[in-house]
Image (cartoon, grey):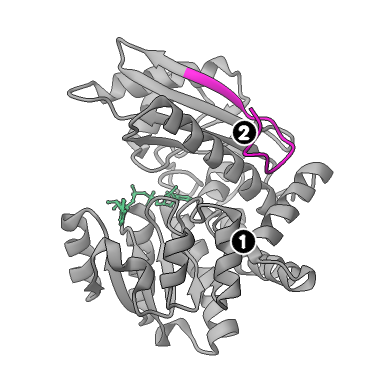
Amino acid sequence: MKNNGQDELDTEYFLLRDEDARLDGVIALHSTALGPGAGGCRFWHYPSREEMMVDAARLARGMTYKNALAELPLGGGKAVLRVPEGSYDREKLFAAFGREVEKLGGRYLTAEDVGTSVGDMQAIASETRHVAGLAQVPGRPGGDPSPWTARGVYGAMEYLAQQHLDRPLADCTVAIQGVGNVGGALARLLHACGAKLVLADTNSERLAKIATETGSAVVAVSEFCGVRADILAPCALGGVFNAVTTAKVRARIVCGAANNQLVSEADGVRLAERGILYAPDCVVNAGGIINVAAEHLGWETAEVVRRVDGTAERLARVLARADQLGVAPNLAADSLARERVKTGLVLAA
Ligand code: NAI
Protein backbone atom coordinates (compact mmCIF):
# COMPACT_ATOMS: atom_id res chain seq x y z
CA MET A 1 0.00 0.00 0.00
CA LYS A 2 1.28 3.51 -0.79
CA ASN A 3 1.43 6.14 1.93
CA ASN A 4 -1.60 8.30 1.23
CA GLY A 5 0.04 9.03 -2.10
CA GLN A 6 2.24 11.52 -0.27
CA ASP A 7 5.59 9.98 -0.98
CA GLU A 8 7.20 7.32 -3.06
CA LEU A 9 8.02 4.86 -0.32
CA ASP A 10 6.08 1.69 0.31
CA THR A 11 4.89 0.64 3.72
CA GLU A 12 5.10 -3.01 4.71
CA TYR A 13 2.56 -4.32 7.21
CA PHE A 14 3.01 -7.24 9.58
CA LEU A 15 -0.21 -8.32 11.24
CA LEU A 16 0.23 -9.58 14.78
CA ARG A 17 -2.14 -12.02 16.38
CA ASP A 18 -1.70 -14.40 19.29
CA GLU A 19 -5.06 -15.34 20.76
CA ASP A 20 -3.60 -17.03 23.80
CA ALA A 21 -1.60 -13.90 24.73
CA ARG A 22 -4.48 -11.64 23.51
CA LEU A 23 -2.10 -9.89 21.15
CA ASP A 24 -3.81 -8.05 18.29
CA GLY A 25 -1.89 -5.43 16.37
CA VAL A 26 0.25 -4.43 13.44
CA ILE A 27 3.82 -3.39 12.76
CA ALA A 28 4.12 -0.87 9.93
CA LEU A 29 7.57 -0.59 8.39
CA HIS A 30 7.81 2.52 6.27
CA SER A 31 11.48 2.78 5.37
CA THR A 32 14.73 1.04 6.20
CA ALA A 33 16.81 3.18 3.84
CA LEU A 34 18.80 4.87 6.62
CA GLY A 35 18.78 1.99 9.12
CA PRO A 36 16.32 -0.24 11.01
CA GLY A 37 12.77 1.10 10.99
CA ALA A 38 12.63 2.56 14.49
CA GLY A 39 9.54 3.76 16.30
CA GLY A 40 7.62 3.10 19.48
CA CYS A 41 4.88 0.64 20.29
CA ARG A 42 1.47 2.20 20.92
CA PHE A 43 -1.01 0.36 23.14
CA TRP A 44 -4.39 1.97 22.63
CA HIS A 45 -8.09 1.43 22.04
CA TYR A 46 -8.99 0.98 18.37
CA PRO A 47 -12.49 0.27 17.11
CA SER A 48 -11.25 -1.65 14.08
CA ARG A 49 -8.17 -3.23 12.58
CA GLU A 50 -8.35 -0.83 9.67
CA GLU A 51 -8.07 2.18 11.97
CA MET A 52 -5.14 0.52 13.66
CA MET A 53 -3.39 0.06 10.31
CA VAL A 54 -4.05 3.62 9.19
CA ASP A 55 -2.66 4.95 12.46
CA ALA A 56 0.38 2.65 12.29
CA ALA A 57 1.14 3.68 8.70
CA ARG A 58 0.91 7.40 9.47
CA LEU A 59 3.03 7.03 12.58
CA ALA A 60 5.64 4.90 10.77
CA ARG A 61 5.97 7.46 8.01
CA GLY A 62 6.32 10.18 10.64
CA MET A 63 9.16 8.17 12.19
CA THR A 64 11.01 7.94 8.86
CA TYR A 65 10.81 11.72 8.61
CA LYS A 66 11.63 12.35 12.26
CA ASN A 67 14.68 10.09 12.23
CA ALA A 68 15.92 11.55 8.96
CA LEU A 69 15.48 15.13 10.21
CA ALA A 70 17.32 14.27 13.43
CA GLU A 71 20.14 12.86 11.25
CA LEU A 72 19.90 9.46 12.91
CA PRO A 73 20.99 6.22 11.20
CA LEU A 74 17.43 4.89 11.52
CA GLY A 75 14.48 4.31 9.24
CA GLY A 76 10.82 4.53 10.21
CA GLY A 77 8.45 1.99 11.71
CA LYS A 78 5.75 1.77 14.32
CA ALA A 79 3.79 -0.88 16.17
CA VAL A 80 0.20 -0.39 17.18
CA LEU A 81 -1.43 -2.88 19.56
CA ARG A 82 -5.05 -2.95 20.57
CA VAL A 83 -5.83 -2.91 24.31
CA PRO A 84 -7.89 -6.12 24.78
CA GLU A 85 -11.37 -6.00 26.24
CA GLY A 86 -11.57 -7.56 29.69
CA SER A 87 -8.70 -9.05 31.64
CA TYR A 88 -5.35 -10.05 30.16
CA ASP A 89 -1.79 -10.78 31.24
CA ARG A 90 0.21 -7.73 30.27
CA GLU A 91 3.63 -9.37 30.50
CA LYS A 92 2.49 -12.28 28.36
CA LEU A 93 1.01 -9.94 25.75
CA PHE A 94 4.19 -7.90 25.41
CA ALA A 95 6.39 -11.03 25.38
CA ALA A 96 4.26 -12.28 22.46
CA PHE A 97 4.80 -8.94 20.74
CA GLY A 98 8.55 -9.37 21.35
CA ARG A 99 8.46 -12.68 19.44
CA GLU A 100 6.89 -10.87 16.48
CA VAL A 101 9.57 -8.17 16.59
CA GLU A 102 12.22 -10.90 16.68
CA LYS A 103 10.78 -12.49 13.53
CA LEU A 104 11.69 -9.31 11.62
CA GLY A 105 15.35 -9.95 12.45
CA GLY A 106 16.28 -6.35 13.27
CA ARG A 107 14.42 -4.59 10.48
CA TYR A 108 12.17 -3.02 13.15
CA LEU A 109 13.37 -1.53 16.46
CA THR A 110 10.68 -0.89 19.07
CA ALA A 111 10.47 1.30 22.19
CA GLU A 112 7.83 3.10 24.30
CA ASP A 113 4.95 5.13 22.94
CA VAL A 114 1.52 6.10 24.21
CA GLY A 115 0.27 3.45 26.63
CA THR A 116 3.54 1.53 27.05
CA SER A 117 6.21 1.66 29.74
CA VAL A 118 9.73 0.57 30.61
CA GLY A 119 8.18 -2.56 32.22
CA ASP A 120 6.55 -3.48 28.89
CA MET A 121 9.89 -3.04 27.11
CA GLN A 122 11.47 -5.43 29.63
CA ALA A 123 8.81 -8.02 28.76
CA ILE A 124 9.54 -7.52 25.03
CA ALA A 125 13.28 -7.86 25.75
CA SER A 126 12.69 -11.38 27.09
CA GLU A 127 12.10 -12.38 23.44
CA THR A 128 14.18 -9.99 21.31
CA ARG A 129 17.11 -7.62 21.47
CA HIS A 130 15.52 -5.25 18.97
CA VAL A 131 13.98 -3.12 21.70
CA ALA A 132 15.11 0.03 23.49
CA GLY A 133 13.73 2.14 26.32
CA LEU A 134 14.76 -0.58 28.77
CA ALA A 135 15.53 -0.01 32.45
CA GLN A 136 18.40 2.45 32.53
CA VAL A 137 21.94 1.42 33.42
CA PRO A 138 23.18 4.36 35.56
CA GLY A 139 25.15 6.85 33.48
CA ARG A 140 24.07 5.29 30.17
CA PRO A 141 21.31 6.34 27.74
CA GLY A 142 18.13 4.33 28.17
CA GLY A 143 15.02 4.25 30.32
CA ASP A 144 11.92 6.32 29.72
CA PRO A 145 12.56 8.52 26.64
CA SER A 146 9.85 11.06 27.60
CA PRO A 147 12.04 13.48 29.60
CA TRP A 148 14.31 13.77 26.55
CA THR A 149 11.34 14.45 24.30
CA ALA A 150 10.15 17.13 26.72
CA ARG A 151 13.62 18.66 26.81
CA GLY A 152 13.76 18.93 23.01
CA VAL A 153 10.29 20.50 22.80
CA TYR A 154 11.22 22.93 25.58
CA GLY A 155 14.40 23.96 23.73
CA ALA A 156 12.43 24.55 20.53
CA MET A 157 9.89 26.64 22.45
CA GLU A 158 12.58 28.73 24.09
CA TYR A 159 13.98 29.51 20.65
CA LEU A 160 10.56 30.31 19.15
CA ALA A 161 9.52 32.59 22.02
CA GLN A 162 12.66 34.63 21.58
CA GLN A 163 12.60 34.67 17.76
CA HIS A 164 8.89 35.09 17.12
CA LEU A 165 7.49 36.72 20.25
CA ASP A 166 10.59 38.73 21.19
CA ARG A 167 10.48 37.62 24.79
CA PRO A 168 11.72 34.80 26.98
CA LEU A 169 9.53 31.80 27.73
CA ALA A 170 9.25 33.04 31.31
CA ASP A 171 6.99 35.82 30.00
CA CYS A 172 4.77 33.50 27.96
CA THR A 173 1.61 31.51 28.60
CA VAL A 174 1.79 27.96 27.30
CA ALA A 175 -1.23 25.68 26.96
CA ILE A 176 -0.47 21.96 27.12
CA GLN A 177 -2.90 19.31 25.86
CA GLY A 178 -2.11 16.02 27.58
CA VAL A 179 0.00 15.99 30.73
CA GLY A 180 1.19 12.39 30.50
CA ASN A 181 4.82 11.35 30.34
CA VAL A 182 5.96 14.08 27.94
CA GLY A 183 3.36 16.78 28.70
CA GLY A 184 3.87 16.37 32.44
CA ALA A 185 7.67 16.67 32.12
CA LEU A 186 7.24 19.68 29.83
CA ALA A 187 4.88 21.33 32.35
CA ARG A 188 7.51 20.94 35.06
CA LEU A 189 10.26 22.44 32.87
CA LEU A 190 8.04 25.39 31.91
CA HIS A 191 6.93 25.95 35.49
CA ALA A 192 10.57 25.94 36.62
CA CYS A 193 11.42 28.69 34.10
CA GLY A 194 8.48 30.84 35.27
CA ALA A 195 6.11 30.42 32.30
CA LYS A 196 2.37 30.53 32.97
CA LEU A 197 0.53 27.29 32.16
CA VAL A 198 -2.92 26.23 31.06
CA LEU A 199 -3.50 22.47 31.06
CA ALA A 200 -6.05 20.09 29.55
CA ASP A 201 -6.25 16.30 29.88
CA THR A 202 -8.98 13.69 29.67
CA ASN A 203 -7.49 12.06 32.76
CA SER A 204 -8.81 14.35 35.51
CA GLU A 205 -6.71 12.78 38.25
CA ARG A 206 -3.45 13.29 36.36
CA LEU A 207 -4.54 16.77 35.35
CA ALA A 208 -5.29 17.79 38.94
CA LYS A 209 -1.94 16.43 40.13
CA ILE A 210 0.19 18.33 37.59
CA ALA A 211 -1.96 21.48 37.84
CA THR A 212 -1.52 21.58 41.63
CA GLU A 213 2.19 20.88 41.38
CA THR A 214 2.76 23.64 38.84
CA GLY A 215 0.08 26.10 40.01
CA SER A 216 -1.53 25.95 36.55
CA ALA A 217 -4.98 26.86 35.26
CA VAL A 218 -7.00 24.08 33.63
CA VAL A 219 -9.41 24.10 30.69
CA ALA A 220 -11.78 21.53 29.22
CA VAL A 221 -10.27 19.36 26.51
CA SER A 222 -12.73 20.81 23.98
CA GLU A 223 -11.41 24.34 24.61
CA PHE A 224 -7.74 23.60 24.06
CA CYS A 225 -7.35 24.81 20.45
CA GLY A 226 -9.00 28.17 21.09
CA VAL A 227 -7.47 28.85 24.47
CA ARG A 228 -5.93 32.27 25.14
CA ALA A 229 -2.20 31.49 25.27
CA ASP A 230 0.99 32.44 23.43
CA ILE A 231 1.97 28.88 22.63
CA LEU A 232 -0.11 25.71 22.17
CA ALA A 233 1.68 22.47 23.00
CA PRO A 234 -0.28 19.40 21.88
CA CYS A 235 1.16 16.50 23.88
CA ALA A 236 -1.70 13.96 23.74
CA LEU A 237 -2.70 12.16 20.56
CA GLY A 238 -2.47 13.24 16.92
CA GLY A 239 -5.12 14.76 14.66
CA VAL A 240 -5.47 17.97 16.68
CA PHE A 241 -5.67 20.44 13.77
CA ASN A 242 -8.28 20.22 11.04
CA ALA A 243 -10.24 22.77 9.02
CA VAL A 244 -12.43 23.60 12.03
CA THR A 245 -9.86 23.70 14.82
CA THR A 246 -7.20 25.64 12.88
CA ALA A 247 -9.70 28.51 12.60
CA LYS A 248 -10.07 28.61 16.40
CA VAL A 249 -6.37 28.96 17.26
CA ARG A 250 -5.53 32.24 18.96
CA ALA A 251 -1.97 31.40 19.98
CA ARG A 252 0.86 32.60 17.74
CA ILE A 253 2.92 29.43 18.02
CA VAL A 254 2.15 25.72 18.02
CA CYS A 255 4.98 23.57 19.37
CA GLY A 256 4.29 20.24 21.03
CA ALA A 257 5.29 16.60 21.24
CA ALA A 258 2.26 14.77 19.86
CA ASN A 259 2.94 12.87 16.65
CA ASN A 260 0.89 13.81 13.57
CA GLN A 261 -0.79 16.91 14.99
CA LEU A 262 -2.03 17.95 11.55
CA VAL A 263 -4.88 15.91 10.08
CA SER A 264 -3.56 16.79 6.62
CA GLU A 265 -0.83 18.89 5.03
CA ALA A 266 -3.45 21.53 4.25
CA ASP A 267 -3.94 22.17 7.97
CA GLY A 268 -0.31 23.25 8.25
CA VAL A 269 -0.90 25.61 5.34
CA ARG A 270 -4.06 26.94 7.07
CA LEU A 271 -2.10 27.70 10.23
CA ALA A 272 0.64 29.44 8.24
CA GLU A 273 -1.92 31.52 6.33
CA ARG A 274 -3.33 32.70 9.66
CA GLY A 275 0.17 33.79 10.73
CA ILE A 276 0.50 30.99 13.27
CA LEU A 277 3.91 29.40 13.42
CA TYR A 278 3.60 25.62 13.48
CA ALA A 279 6.81 23.89 14.61
CA PRO A 280 6.59 20.53 12.82
CA ASP A 281 6.17 17.73 15.37
CA CYS A 282 8.65 15.51 13.55
CA VAL A 283 11.34 18.16 14.07
CA VAL A 284 10.72 19.09 17.71
CA ASN A 285 9.76 15.76 19.28
CA ALA A 286 12.87 13.74 18.34
CA GLY A 287 14.42 13.82 21.84
CA GLY A 288 13.03 10.43 22.80
CA ILE A 289 14.11 8.66 19.64
CA ILE A 290 17.58 10.20 19.98
CA ASN A 291 17.83 8.60 23.42
CA VAL A 292 16.49 5.32 22.00
CA ALA A 293 19.07 5.44 19.17
CA ALA A 294 21.87 6.12 21.65
CA GLU A 295 20.82 3.19 23.83
CA HIS A 296 20.64 0.85 20.87
CA LEU A 297 23.81 2.04 19.15
CA GLY A 298 25.90 2.36 22.33
CA TRP A 299 26.39 6.15 22.28
CA GLU A 300 27.29 8.14 25.39
CA THR A 301 24.76 10.29 27.31
CA ALA A 302 26.77 13.40 26.31
CA GLU A 303 25.91 12.62 22.69
CA VAL A 304 22.20 12.47 23.59
CA VAL A 305 22.44 15.86 25.31
CA ARG A 306 24.26 17.37 22.32
CA ARG A 307 21.73 16.09 19.81
CA VAL A 308 18.61 16.85 21.88
CA ASP A 309 19.89 20.34 22.58
CA GLY A 310 20.38 20.71 18.82
CA THR A 311 16.58 20.62 18.34
CA ALA A 312 16.24 24.42 18.13
CA GLU A 313 19.02 24.59 15.54
CA ARG A 314 17.41 21.88 13.40
CA LEU A 315 14.08 23.68 13.70
CA ALA A 316 15.69 26.96 12.67
CA ARG A 317 17.01 25.26 9.52
CA VAL A 318 13.57 23.96 8.62
CA LEU A 319 11.97 27.36 9.21
CA ALA A 320 14.63 29.03 7.08
CA ARG A 321 13.91 26.53 4.31
CA ALA A 322 10.18 27.25 4.60
CA ASP A 323 10.87 30.98 4.24
CA GLN A 324 13.19 30.40 1.31
CA LEU A 325 10.71 28.17 -0.54
CA GLY A 326 7.69 30.22 0.53
CA VAL A 327 5.93 27.15 1.93
CA ALA A 328 4.47 26.19 5.31
CA PRO A 329 6.97 24.69 7.80
CA ASN A 330 5.36 21.23 7.71
CA LEU A 331 5.92 21.06 3.94
CA ALA A 332 9.50 22.27 4.30
CA ALA A 333 10.17 19.60 6.94
CA ASP A 334 8.65 16.81 4.85
CA SER A 335 10.58 17.75 1.72
CA LEU A 336 13.86 18.00 3.66
CA ALA A 337 13.22 14.59 5.23
CA ARG A 338 12.55 13.02 1.82
CA GLU A 339 15.76 14.53 0.49
CA ARG A 340 17.71 13.08 3.43
CA VAL A 341 16.24 9.61 2.91
CA LYS A 342 17.27 9.78 -0.74
CA THR A 343 20.78 11.07 -0.16
CA GLY A 344 21.39 8.93 2.95
CA LEU A 345 22.62 11.79 5.13
CA VAL A 346 23.13 10.77 8.77
CA LEU A 347 25.41 12.19 11.45
CA ALA A 348 27.93 9.73 12.94
CA ALA A 349 28.41 9.89 16.73
P1 NAI B 1 1.10 9.44 27.60
O1 NAI B 1 0.16 8.33 27.35
O2 NAI B 1 2.01 9.34 28.78
O3 NAI B 1 0.28 10.82 27.77
C1 NAI B 1 -0.76 11.21 26.95
C2 NAI B 1 -1.70 12.06 27.80
O4 NAI B 1 -2.70 12.63 26.95
C3 NAI B 1 -2.44 11.26 28.88
O5 NAI B 1 -2.36 11.94 30.12
C4 NAI B 1 -3.87 11.19 28.36
O6 NAI B 1 -4.83 11.15 29.42
C5 NAI B 1 -3.96 12.49 27.58
N1 NAI B 1 -5.00 12.55 26.56
C6 NAI B 1 -5.44 11.58 25.71
N2 NAI B 1 -6.37 12.06 24.88
C7 NAI B 1 -6.52 13.37 25.19
C8 NAI B 1 -7.31 14.44 24.67
N3 NAI B 1 -8.16 14.24 23.66
N4 NAI B 1 -7.18 15.66 25.23
C9 NAI B 1 -6.34 15.88 26.26
N5 NAI B 1 -5.57 14.91 26.79
C10 NAI B 1 -5.66 13.69 26.27
O7 NAI B 1 1.90 9.67 26.24
P2 NAI B 1 3.30 10.41 26.04
O8 NAI B 1 4.38 9.41 26.04
O9 NAI B 1 3.37 11.57 26.96
O10 NAI B 1 3.16 10.92 24.53
C11 NAI B 1 2.36 12.04 24.21
C12 NAI B 1 2.44 12.31 22.72
O11 NAI B 1 3.77 12.59 22.35
C13 NAI B 1 1.99 11.17 21.81
O12 NAI B 1 1.38 11.67 20.66
C14 NAI B 1 3.28 10.48 21.46
O13 NAI B 1 3.18 9.77 20.24
C15 NAI B 1 4.19 11.68 21.33
N6 NAI B 1 5.59 11.37 21.51
C16 NAI B 1 6.02 10.78 22.66
C17 NAI B 1 7.37 10.52 22.84
C18 NAI B 1 7.91 9.98 24.12
O14 NAI B 1 9.13 10.07 24.35
N7 NAI B 1 7.06 9.46 25.01
C19 NAI B 1 8.34 10.79 21.76
C20 NAI B 1 7.78 11.49 20.64
C21 NAI B 1 6.44 11.72 20.50
What distance separates the C-alpha of mark 1 from that of mark 2?
23 Å
Which corner quadrant of the image does residue 90 belong to?
top left
- Residue type indicated by callout 1: Arg
- Residue type indicated by callout 2: Gly
Residue at left offset 51%, top offset 47%: 141
Tell me the SS state at disc 1: helix
Q: Point out residue 267 in the picture as x, y percentages from the top left corner.
A: 55, 60
| Residue 45 counted in the magenta span | no
Q: In the displayed structure, does residue 6 sit left or right of residue 59?
A: right
- Disc 2 marks which residue? 37
Q: How many residues crowd around disc 2 within 10 Å: few (fewer than 14), some, or many (20 or more)?
A: many
Q: Is residue 104 above or below residue 40?
A: above
Q: Which mark is residue 306?
A: 1
Q: Point out residue 257 in the picture as x, y percentages from the top left corner.
A: 46, 57
The quadrant of the image that shows the N terminus is top right
Viewer can see residue 193: yes
Q: Which residues are magenta?
A: 1-15
**Along the polypeptide, which appears first: circle 1 or circle 2?**
2
Q: Is residue 186 above or below residue 61?
A: below
Q: Residue furthest front?
A: 244
Q: Which mark is residue 29?
A: none
Residue at left offset 45%, top offset 28%: 50
